[in-house]
C-alpha cells in the first residue's frame, strides 16, 4: 500500500476550495491483511466518503464544526474543513471485502488479502 | 514491531518535518503558547456572548477527557492508547503517524469568561467547549435621555 500524494497534488489544482488537510494514519499489516486507522475528528458519518477505484483508495471527509452564528475565529489549527488522503493498494489485497468502522472520529479500515495471497501451511506427507 | 529499514512514506516524513519547522519558528502570542502542532489540535473563537473552543481529540473515550477551568486557564488532558499491534505480534508497521500517549493542552481564557457557565460536548472525535462571557462585560447601548 503506497501513498499517492504526488499524483493527488498534481490532479488537484491548489485552489482554496479544493484544499484539504492530510489526516494522520497508522497502517500495519499481518498475515491476513492490512489495517488502517485514520484520524478524522469533526467529520459526521454521513460526510465521510470512502472510494475504491481500481487500485486507488481515497479517504475524504468534511468537518462539521457547528459554529454559533457570528463567531470570529481567533486561532485555527484545523484551518480547512476538509480531509483527504489517497493510497495505492497492491494487487493481492481484496478490495471487495474491505470493512470500515467509524467511531469517535477514527476510521478503521480492514483490507483482507485475497485468498490466494494468504500464507498457507503446506502439509508434508511422509512416504 | 517490525519496521522497514527505508520508510517509503517520504511525503509523510516531509509533512512531519514541515510541522516541526512551523512549531519551531512560529511566533506565539501568549506565554502559555497556542503553539501549533500539538495534540489535540485546537480552534478557538468567540462571539460577543461566548468563547468557543474546539479540540480535535479523535479516538478518546469522552469520559476520560479531563477538562478544567481554573483561574482563567483552560486545561484539556487525557490519554490515547496506541492502535498499533503489540511488539510481540508479528505484524509490519508501514505508517505510524497518529498520536499515542498522554496529552495536555493549556489555553488562557479572556478575563470575561465566566467559569460557572461552561458547557462541553463530544461528538465525532471533537470536543466543543463553550464558555459564556460575563454579562457585565458585554457591550451595552446606553440610551441618551
Image (cartoon, rainbow, N blue to C red):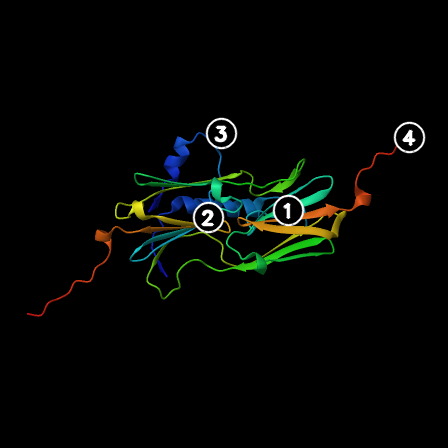
Q: Residues within 10 Å of mark 2 (few under 14, many from 20)?
A: some
Q: Which residue is mark 3?
A: A15
Q: Which residue is mark 1?
A: B53
Q: Residues within 10 Å of mark 4 (few under 14, many from 20)?
A: few
Cα–Cα gap, marks 3 and 1? 28 Å
User: Does residue A61 appear left or right of residue B77 in this picture?
Assistant: left
Nearer to us of marks 4 and 2 is 4
Question: Element under label 1?
Answer: strand
Q: Residues within 10 Å of mark 1 (few under 14, many from 20)?
A: many
Quadrant, the N terminus of chain B = bottom left
Of residue B93 and residue B11, the one placed in the foreground of this image is B93
Q: Residues within 10 Å of mark 3 (few under 14, many from 20)?
A: few
Whether labels 3 and 4 belong to a single chain: the reply is no
Dots 4, 1 in contact, CB < 8 A: no
Dots 4, 2 in contact, CB < 8 A: no
Up-down: is A51 above or below B117? above
Cα–Cα gap, marks 3 and 2? 22 Å
Cα–Cα gap, marks 3 and 4? 50 Å
Nearer to us of marks 3 and 4 is 4
Can residue B135 be seen here? yes
Cα–Cα gap, marks 1 and 2? 22 Å
Nearer to us of marks 4 and 1 is 4
Q: Farthest residue toward the bottom?
A: A126
Residue drawn at the location 10% of the way across and 67% of the way down: A125
- Which quarter of the figure has residue B85? bottom left
Task: Give the chain letter at badge 3.
Answer: A
Amino acid at each position: 500500500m503506497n501513498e499517492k500524494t504526488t499524483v493527488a497534488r498534481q490532479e488537484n489544482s491548489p485552489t482554496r476550495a479544493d484544499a484539504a488537510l492530510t489526516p494522520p494514519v497508522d497502517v500495519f499489516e499481518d498475515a491476513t491483511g492490512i489495517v488502517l486507522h485514520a484520524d478524522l475528528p469533526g467529520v459526521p458519518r454521513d460526510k465521510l466518503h470512502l472510494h475504491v477505484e481500481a487500485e486507488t483508495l481515497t479517504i475524504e471527509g468534511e468537518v462539521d464544526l457547528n459554529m454559533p452564528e457570528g463567531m470570529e475565529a481567533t486561532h485555527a489549527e484545523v484551518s480547512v474543513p476538509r480531509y483527504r488522503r489517497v493510497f495505492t493498494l497492491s494487487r493481492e489485497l481484496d478490495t471487495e471485502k474491505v470493512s470500515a468502522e467509524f467511531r469517535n472520529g477514527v476510521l478503521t479500515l480492514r483490507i483482507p488479502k485475497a485468498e490466494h495471497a494468504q500464507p498457507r501451511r503446506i502439509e508434508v506427507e511422509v512416504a | 514491531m517490525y519496521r522497514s529499514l527505508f520508510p517509503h512514506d517520504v511525503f509523510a516524513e516531509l509533512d512531519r518535518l514541515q510541522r516541526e519547522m512551523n512549531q519551531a519558528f512560529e511566533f506565539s502570542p501568549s506565554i502559555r503558547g497556542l503553539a501549533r502542532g500539538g495534540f489535540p489540535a485546537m480552534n478557538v473563537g468567540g462571539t460577543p456572548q461566548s468563547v468557543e473552543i474546539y479540540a480535535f481529540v479523535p479516538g478518546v473515550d469522552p469520559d476520560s477527557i479531563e477538562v478544567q477551568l481554573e483561574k482563567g486557564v483552560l486545561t484539556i488532558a487525557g490519554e490515547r492508547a496506541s492502535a498499533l499491534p503489540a511488539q510481540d505480534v508479528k505484524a509490519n508497521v508501514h505508517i505510524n503517524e497518529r498520536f499515542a500517549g498522554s496529552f495536555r493542552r493549556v489555553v488562557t481564557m479572556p478575563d470575561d469568561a465566566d467559569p460557572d457557565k461552561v458547557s462541553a460536548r463530544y461528538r465525532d472525535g471533537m470536543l466543543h467547549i463553550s464558555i459564556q462571557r460575563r454579562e457585565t462585560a458585554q457591550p451595552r447601548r446606553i440610551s441618551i435621555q
